[in-house]
Amino acid sequence: MPDEEGHPGREEMDLRMVLSALADPLRYEVISTFVREEVGTERNCSSFGFDISKSTLSHHFRIMREAGLIRQVDRGNSRKAHLRHEDLEARFPGLLDLVRANPGLPAHRK
Amino acid sequence: MPDEEGHPGREEMDLRMVLSALADPLRYEVISTFVREEVGTERNCSSFGFDISKSTLSHHFRIMREAGLIRQVDRGNSRKAHLRHEDLEARFPGLLDLVRANPGLPAHRK
């Protein structure tokens, strides 16, 4: 079962949910950014600089969280996200390499 | 440029379009079926036995064609589709292996 924040366990991840999460330009850019950074890098949602409302941004992060692409954790008074690098490599080998090799077009920004 | 039937060249294929095409359960099942068959296998759209209208089925096949997942060709009085196996392996190495390893749930059928 996913935990109380909706993070699925590694074995619960579903490729179709992951593909669906990645099919959106904004979400693809988030994952594409994480893939290029050091493993374990944590970021605030707002650090990506997307020009959209906070609720829309939260919606996108929820979809990525529920697909298992990212994990969100509370750090004091801020909420940080990181890529579930090890889980994704184990569950869907080659997927992150594909994203790394295909940067795609940048999503709309501020 | 894509040809007159909307088939993109190998280098024109876009991973996000491919992911978006695969994110739908029916389309995922089509590609998942092709991946398990002999390379070069040709099929009619109707051979999959989906319980949907012909126009909806055509729409799904158009999305897969325009993403570069399949090629559709006229064979006398029928239209056949095959997976663009070689192009996909070259352009997105590992993608078909991921689909092969993740059969997913069957889409709604007759």
Image (cartoon, coloured by chain):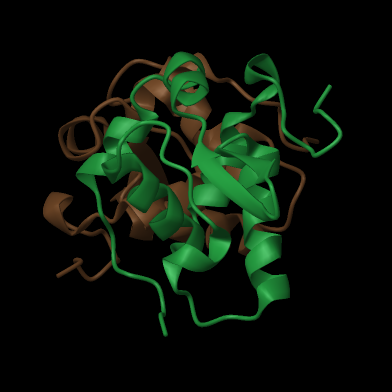
Chain colours: A green, B brown
Q: Is residue B24 visible?
A: no
The location of residue A27, given as percent across then percent down, is: 50, 58
Identify the residue shown where x is 29% and y is 66%. Answer: B6
Give the percent coordinates (x, y) of residue A23.
Answer: 49, 55
Up the image or down, B75 lies above or below B89; here it is below
- A34 lies above or below A60: above
What residue is shown at x 35% (from left), y 44% (from top)?
A: B70
Nearest the camera: A74 or A71?
Answer: A74
Foreground of the two, B78 or B3: B3
Quadrant location of the N terminus of chain B? Answer: bottom left
Q: In which quadrant will I find the C terminus of chain B? A: top right
Residue farthest along the front direction in this orientation: A76
Horizontally, is A92 left or right of B74 in the view? right
Q: Is residue A54 above or below residue B90?
A: below
Task: Give whichever of A103, A43 is nearer the camera.
Answer: A43
Name the spot of residue A49 as percent of width and height, x first.
44, 73
- Establish if A3 lies above or below A78: above
Left or right relative to B19: residue B47: right
